[in-house]
Image: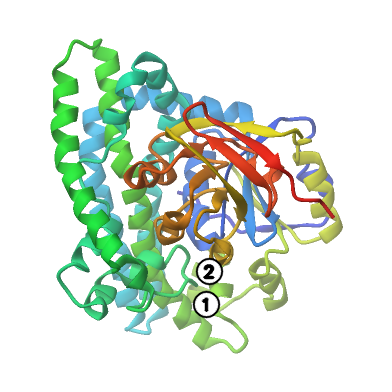
């Protein structure tokens, strides 16, 4: 993995798409420390341009469409040809990354900046190796899941079912047997997506420790036992060899999609200590500021005691910059006017109307009031019976999803977090709408027909 020094851009023309088509593949709360590594994995394989664009409290990830889809399609073919190798290497790469991240945390205790820099370089290299699975999931979503849905739609629920528990399920199961304070100490990292995120506390776990949640947990573990047997029976049936292979891949990634993110969370938990160490060493800097430094800036700080201007980093921390990644450099655009102009070039004119369509993740119908979730801060808006409309979902969103009558997301496929959780909860769910959060507004009354994959406005709240 190459480590680039970021360039500051003053003029929009050096970053403009110039007619090249881009698309939003994901939207997330951001930090450079978490994102740079897996973006570099993609640019190293030929992605012409990746634009990290500020949108409210989060960032939209815009990819150059032609080169991105070419890479993911090629990787889907590689996964099919090398599936057993790909699957076998996951636990090895996972363990290597967690060990390297723990090494960073340990090195911080030495207060030897050279040792810390060496440990951090090792960590980001191991994180880069996990890019095979970060992007493997998206190759599955774009090029393997859709084919399988067409070929065996009546069996897709068997393929999508988890046959081993994700970490959130393990935490919920632990709450059946142990005090919340003890469980929180073991699983506090589940709330850490970026180094600046706070840990889970025992108080947070009250959502997962209710009588209803305990009943759901027992039921989920029963479903997991049944899922393994059902999938084995499917694989014994008369299916084409290629279809069976795709079933194996999609079935494995139903678990890996979440587990790979959980590995990232544990890694970020270890890197919190590095961020805190650097923040303490220099007045005015925060953990969040450090998390928005790229790898080159962090290693330069450690090895040469040189830092970028804090005023510029505060702009990054405030979500007031745009990032542009290519195979040869990282650009940072600070000009508000230039960023707005870039947005006009990137943003398509969203369709208007009374409905949106997506992929059925869990069938059923529901009516309710729309609540738009663009950021984790918005989760407290959700009340019982609302329609949970989000750009994406995470395991930590689960207690709020439980309150909803139905779930609708811009992103995701049939093995996404929203899809898996909605099936466990038996709630109507439509994923992959792309534009639901753009079309609907808080207060709209909608009908979700997840069986057909359609969300229709019944009563539109008056727009101001």
Q: Do callouts 1 and 2 mark residues in contact (Cβ within 8 Å)?
A: yes
Q: Which of the 4 image quadrants contains residue 106?
A: bottom left
Q: Position of residue 393 (x, y in %)?
A: 48, 51
SS at mark 1 in the image: helix
Residue at image mark 1: 287
Camera-side residue: 66 or 357?
357
Q: What residue do we see at 58% from left, 35% from top?
A: 433
Q: Position of residue 32 (x, y in %)?
A: 55, 60
Q: Distance between the Cα atoms at labels 1 and 2?
A: 6 Å
The answer to whether 55 is drawn above or below residue 66 in the figure is: below
Q: What residue do we see at 35% from left, 60% from top?
A: 122
Camera-side residue: 426 or 304?
426
Which disc, if any, is residue 291? 2
Q: Which of the 4 image quadrants contains residue 4?
A: bottom right
Q: What residue do we see at 47% from left, 71% from top?
A: 197
The answer to whether 368 is drawn above or below residue 124 in the figure is: above
Which disc, if any, is residue 438? none
Q: Is residue 43 visible?
A: yes
The answer to whether 324 is drawn above or below residue 336 in the figure is: above
SS at mark 2 in the image: helix
Quarter placement of the C terminus: bottom right
Q: Which of the 4 image quadrants contains residue 309?
A: bottom right
Category of crowding for the residue at label 1, using alpha-carbon neighbours closer than 10 angstroms: few (below 14), some (14–19), many (at least 20): many
């Amino acid at each position: 993995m190459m480590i680039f020094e970021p360039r500051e851009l003053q003029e929009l023309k050096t970053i403009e798409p110039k007619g090249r088509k881009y698309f939003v593949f994901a939207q997330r709360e951001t930090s450079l420390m978490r994102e740079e590594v897996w973006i570099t994995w993609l640019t190293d394989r030929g992605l012409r341009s990746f634009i990290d664009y500020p949108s409210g409290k989060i960032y939209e990830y815009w990819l150059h469409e032609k080169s991105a889809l070419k890479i993911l399609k090629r990787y889907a073919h590689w996964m099919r040809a090398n599936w057993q190798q790909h699957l076998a290497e996951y636990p090895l790469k996972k363990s290597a990354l967690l060990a390297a991240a723990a090494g960073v945390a340990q090195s911080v205790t030495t207060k030897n900046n050279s040792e810390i820099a060496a440990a951090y370089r090792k960590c980001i290299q191991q994180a880069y190796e996990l890019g095979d699975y970060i992007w493997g999931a998206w190759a599955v979503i774009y090029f393997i899941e859709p084919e399988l849905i067409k070929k065996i739609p009546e069996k897709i629920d068997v393929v999508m079912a988890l046959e081993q528990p994700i970490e959130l399920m393990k935490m919920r199961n632990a709450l059946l047997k142990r005090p919340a304070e003890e469980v929180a100490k073991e699983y506090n990292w589940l709330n850490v997506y970026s180094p600046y995120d706070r840990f889970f506390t025992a108080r947070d776990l009250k959502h997962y420790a209710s009588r209803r949640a305990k009943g759901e947990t027992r039921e989920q573990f029963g479903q997991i036992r049944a899922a393994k047997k059902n999938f084995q029976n499917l694989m014994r049936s008369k299916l084409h060899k290629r279809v069976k292979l795709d079933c194996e891949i999609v079935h494995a990634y139903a678990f890996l999609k979440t587990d790979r993110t959980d590995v990232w969370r544990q890694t970020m938990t270890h890197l919190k200590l590095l961020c805190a160490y650097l923040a303490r060493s220099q007045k005015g800097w925060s953990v969040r500021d450090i998390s928005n430094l790229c790898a080159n800036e962090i290693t330069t700080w450690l090895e040469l005691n040189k830092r970028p201007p804090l005023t510029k980093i505060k702009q990054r921390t405030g979500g007031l910059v745009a990032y542009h990644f290519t195979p040869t450099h990282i650009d940072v655009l600070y000009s508000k006017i230039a960023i707005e102009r870039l947005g006009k070039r990137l943003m398509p004119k969203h369709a208007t109307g009374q409905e949106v369509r997506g992929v059925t993740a869990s069938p059923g119908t529901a009516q309710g009031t729309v609540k738009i979730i663009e950021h984790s801060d918005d989760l407290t808006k959700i009340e019982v019976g609302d329609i949970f409309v989000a750009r994406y979902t995470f395991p930590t969103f689960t207690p709020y999803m439980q309150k909803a009558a139905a779930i609708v997301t811009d992103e995701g496929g049939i093995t996404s977090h929203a899809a898996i959780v909605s099936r466990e909860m038996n709630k109507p769910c439509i994923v992959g709408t792309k534009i639901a959060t753009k079309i609907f507004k808080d207060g709209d009354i909608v009908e979700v027909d997840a069986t057909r994959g359609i969300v229709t406005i019944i009563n539109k709240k008056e727009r101001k």
